Image (cartoon, rainbow, N blue to C red):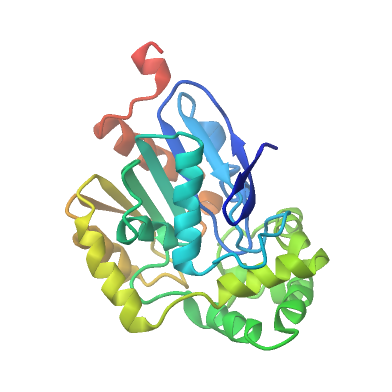
Amino acid sequence: MPRIELSSGPVDYQDTGGAGPVLVFGHGMPMNGSQWRKVVPLLDGYRCVLPTLPLGGHRQPMHPDADLSQRGVARLLGEFIERLGLDQVTLVLNDWGGGQFLVTEGRAQRIARLVLVACEAFDNFPPGPAAKAMARACRVPGGAWLLTRLMNIPAFRHHRAGYGGMSLRGIPDEVMDDWFAPATRSKAIRRDLAKFATGAPDRETLLAWSERLREFDRPVLVVWATEDRLMPREHGSRLAGLYPQGRLIEIADSSTLIPEDQPERLTEALTSFLVHTGAEPARHTGQ
């Protein structure tokens, strides 16, 4: 897997290559690009780039002084896009919504369009009672260590209030093993995980940042799940109304991880949006 050294530390990434329009995919905590493993193979004609951001599923720790707050990780994502020389990017987010803050940080020049798939928004950082409890645990000494141990207990990892509720189909254990392994093994990764988990600002700041998202005047597709336990259903329509060129699609029979529950329907909505907004796959343009 290729790796790039950024100001905060090393970031691994996957890159399908090719001449098609560039899609950059974000992921949740403490996940990685495998969150999109069912979707990327369906995107023939597009270049898919999947960085493993320092949300706890990364394999190389960040520098000890790295800013891994919501703002810091958003800026790191922007730096990643810039350093790879990517332009006219479609940024696709699911679960983690902080990538939107590239707009508030003035780092969205290379973003041509946004696709927001059942992600954190407004003051829902972190999302839901279970994630907020995890953040509180990470504030106390040894809390992140305890959390990683709990994540390896089947009854905890599959509980409907936590990761078990993020997919109606159920996330395979081998996938979650891969997500949770780095923080289980490494104290430095747990440090990074705790930084991110506790890195959301207060409610007033989050809502102020949200208002500034109105400045993003490029196409935005909002894809929401009707059975989501973590991302309030009304946030989908609010987000679509917030962005000047926002459009909402709801997908039934899915929870937060729409790429897990409904990959074909999500891909259909994504590709239709891309073609409609001028990002046709390479095979259609003769490239």
Q: Is residue 139 visible?
A: yes
For image coordinates 57% across by 74% down, the residue present is 197
The quadrant of the image that shows the C terminus is: top left
Q: Tell me the quarter of the picture where residue 105 sits.
A: bottom left
Q: Position of residue 252 (x, y in %)?
A: 40, 57
> Is 75 in front, or is 46?
75
For image coordinates 78% across by 61% down, the residue present is 181
Judge from the rendering whether residue 185 lies leftward or rightward of residue 236; answer left or right. right
Above or below 152: residue 77? above
Query: Disc count in the image?
Result: 0
> Is 273 in front, or is 46?
46
Q: Position of residue 131 (x, y in %)?
A: 55, 77
Judge from the rendering whether residue 97 lies leftward or rightward of residue 220; answer left or right. right
Q: Position of residue 156 (x, y in %)?
A: 71, 77
The quadrant of the image that shows the N terminus is: top right
Q: Is residue 254 visible?
A: no
Q: Position of residue 37 (x, y in %)?
A: 60, 43
For image coordinates 50% across by 39% down, the residue present is 83
Q: In this view, which residue lies farthest toward the right?
A: 185
Q: In this view, which residue lies farthest toward the left?
A: 244
Judge from the rendering whether residue 173 lies leftward or rightward of residue 114; answer left or right. right
> Is 191 in front, or is 210?
191
